[in-house]
Image (cartoon, grey):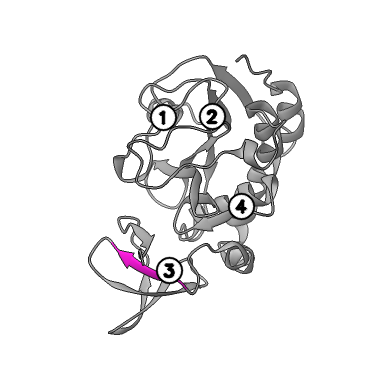
């Protein structure tokens, strides 16, 4: 199904915040994140919103694949220069922004997933090019617009149309774009602190038994002021900050 992309409306909303900002929509690409990272390594550091109608090699965290079909999902990346004093908690702040832009029922699973009723609605992948605090950040977001099969997925999928039957990928992108840019600029100035309570309000793991990929288990107690997951284990309270840790609610 063809999507009408509101590129002009997005540009008008965002360009005053990000001079030189551009919006691109590509019918097919390997990965919107990979493309912006390639450009950044070649010195193209302009603020860019790149939408992929279909991705042939979309990537999630830890190298997982992300399927993307035209009209049935929304996959895009926002690239921009960013220089926060501390990068910790950035994926959580992005999750807060996206969830708040879309629907009150959307919850956040640490560190980078959006959930609806314990099913995965979307994910966030953040990469950076350059060294030091001043880098080019690429924020990739993938969201299911229409229901999709659950085969081969470790977490059952959810879709935005369960919340709003008339929502399409273009309208979802329009809702997300400007607040996301404002979030990134606020994070650059103030870090995770302004988003801490807002994440806690949507935390899908809080007070639940969780099992970590390293074998540790315990009860999740929200996140710290720097975005670490707090887990009460047999050895006491642990602050989990590694992006290589996969967290899932323990099965009964």
What mark, if any, has residue 229 been given in the picture? 3
User: Gap in Å between the C-alphas at discs 4 and 1?
Assistant: 21 Å
User: Gap in Å between the C-alphas at discs 2 and 3?
Assistant: 29 Å
- x and y, in percent, of residue 36 in the image: 45, 29
Q: Residue at x 62, y 47 (%)?
A: 98
User: Answer yes or no: do the residues labelled 2 and 1 have beta carbons within 8 Å?
Assistant: yes
Which residue is denoted by mark 1 in the rendering?
Answer: 67
User: Answer yes or no: do the residues labelled 3 and 1 have beta carbons within 8 Å?
Assistant: no
Q: Nearer the viewer, mark 2 or mark 3?
A: 2
- x and y, in percent, of residue 83 in the image: 52, 50
Residue 166 lies in what quarter of the image? top right
Q: Quadrant of the C terminus?
A: bottom left
User: Gap in Å between the C-alphas at discs 3 and 1?
Assistant: 28 Å
The extreme left residue here reads 215
Asked whether the viewer can see residue 188, the reply is no
Q: Main secondary structure of the magenta part?
A: strand
Which residue is denoted by mark 2 in the rendering?
Answer: 73
Vertical placement of 182 versus 20: above or below?
below
User: Answer yes or no: do the residues labelled 4 and 3 have beta carbons within 8 Å?
Assistant: no
Residue 93 lies in what quarter of the image? bottom right
Asked whether the viewer can see residue 205, the reply is yes
Q: Residues within 10 Å of mark 4 (few under 14, many from 20)?
A: many
Left/right of residue 236 with respect to residue 220 in the rendered view:
left
Q: Which residues are magenta?
A: 208-212
Q: If you read the primary sequence from the N terminus, does the residue marked by circle 4 or circle 3 appear first?
A: 4
Q: If you read the primary sequence from the N terminus, does the residue marked by circle 2 or circle 1 appear first?
A: 1
């Amino acid at each position: 199904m063809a999507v009408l992309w509101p590129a002009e409306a997005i540009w008008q909303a965002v360009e005053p915040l990000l001079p030189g900002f551009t919006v691109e929509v590509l019918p097919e690409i390997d990965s919107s994140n990979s493309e912006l990272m390639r450009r950044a390594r070649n010195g193209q550091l302009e603020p860019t919103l790149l939408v992929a109608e279909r991705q042939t090699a979309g990537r999630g965290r830890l190298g997982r694949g992300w399927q993307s079909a035209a009209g049935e999902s929304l996959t895009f990346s926002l690239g921009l220069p960013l220089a926060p004093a501390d990068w910790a908690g950035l994926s959580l702040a992005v999750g807060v922004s996206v969830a708040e832009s879309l629907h009150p029922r959307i919850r956040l699973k640490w560190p980078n997933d959006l959930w609806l009723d314990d099913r995965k609605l979307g994910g966030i992948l953040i990469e950076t090019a350059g060294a030091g605090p001043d880098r080019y950040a690429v924020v990739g977001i993938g969201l299911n617009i229409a229901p999709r099969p659950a085969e081969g997925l470790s977490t059952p999928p959810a879709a935005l149309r369960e919340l709003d039957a008339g929502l399409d990928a273009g309208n979802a992108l329009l809702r997300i774009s400007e607040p996301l840019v404002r979030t990134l600029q606020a994070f650059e100035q103030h870090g995770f602190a302004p988003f801490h309570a807002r994440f806690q309000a949507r935390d899908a793991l809080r007070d639940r038994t969780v099992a970590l990929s390293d074998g540790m288990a315990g009860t999740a107690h929200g996140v710290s002021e720097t975005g670490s997951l707090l887990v009460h284990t047999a050895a006491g309270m642990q602050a989990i900050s590694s992006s290589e840790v996969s967290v899932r609610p323990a099965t009964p």
